Image (cartoon, rainbow, N blue to C red):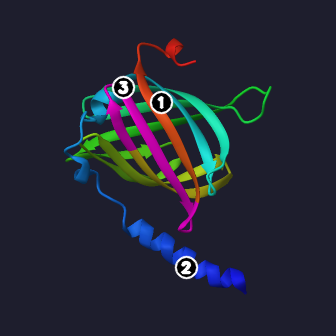
Amino acid sequence: FKWQQLALPLVLSGLLTGCATPDASQWAWRQPALNPQTFFNGTLCADGVVRDYAGRQIRQFNAVIEGSWQGDTGTLHEVFYFYDKPGEAPVREIRVWTLIKDGDGFRAKATDVPEETRMTYAGNSIHMAYTLAYGDPGDTISLSMDDWMYQVAEGVVVNETRMSKLGLPVGQVLLVMRKVDGVGDCR
């Protein structure tokens, strides 16, 4: 019976938090300005951790991101290397994003993001909220992702993604992306 007493406040808290998501435009005054077409062009390195609902680190990773643009359409080819067990080879995961300029933002879709989402940006911030189909083909779970990026210095972006399932928090991804001259600078 006690879990039922806790369940309602948790669900209501998740629903209210989801409604209170800030908009990127409120950070329009922040500098340095983060323009997706400029920042996500060329090679980026990313380093980060995945944390569970209690804030415990459950994975760490490095990634190489290659961004390219043809007019108003961009492609981000991301290769992640997860270091889950000591002494074992890293687990490799790939995600490819397509970004299409649309008014004051972008339409965005990825290989494991089944429904197109909207990327908004202003000042030093980018925001996307989307559903990620995580796992192996035929064995995926749907996670709601609330993704915020902040440019904190020229060529350096901090990314925080909150993950939830059915409105309840299940984890967080924290990473730093930096522009580099070539892939060899990432590892």
Upstream in sequence: badge 1 or badge 2: 2
Q: Main secondary structure of the magenta part?
A: strand
User: Residue 26 in the image: x percent, y percent?
Assistant: 24, 53
User: Residue 34 in the image: x percent, y percent?
Assistant: 28, 35
Give the residue type at disc 1: His
Upstream in sequence: badge 3 or badge 2: 2
Label 3: how many residues lie within 10 Å, few (<14), some (14-19) or many (20+)? some
Depth order, front residue of 31/36: 31
| Residue at 26% from the left image edge and 46% from the top image edge | 105
Q: Mark 1 highlights which residue? A: 77
User: Residue 133 in the image: x percent, y percent?
Assistant: 57, 52
Give the residue type at disc 2: Pro
Image quarter hosting the C terminus: top right
- Judged by depth in the image, the label closer to the viewer, 1 or 2, is 2
Label 2: how many residues lie within 10 Å, few (<14), some (14-19) or many (20+)? few
Give the residue type at disc 3: Ser
Image quarter hosting the N terminus: bottom right
Picture quadrant where residue 17 is located: bottom left
**95 sits to left or right of 151:** right
Q: In this view, does 86 lie above or below 102?
A: above
Upstream in sequence: badge 3 or badge 1: 3
Label 2: state its secondary structure. Answer: helix
Q: Mark 3 highlights which residue? A: 68
| Residue at 68% from the left image edge and 52% from the top image edge | 138
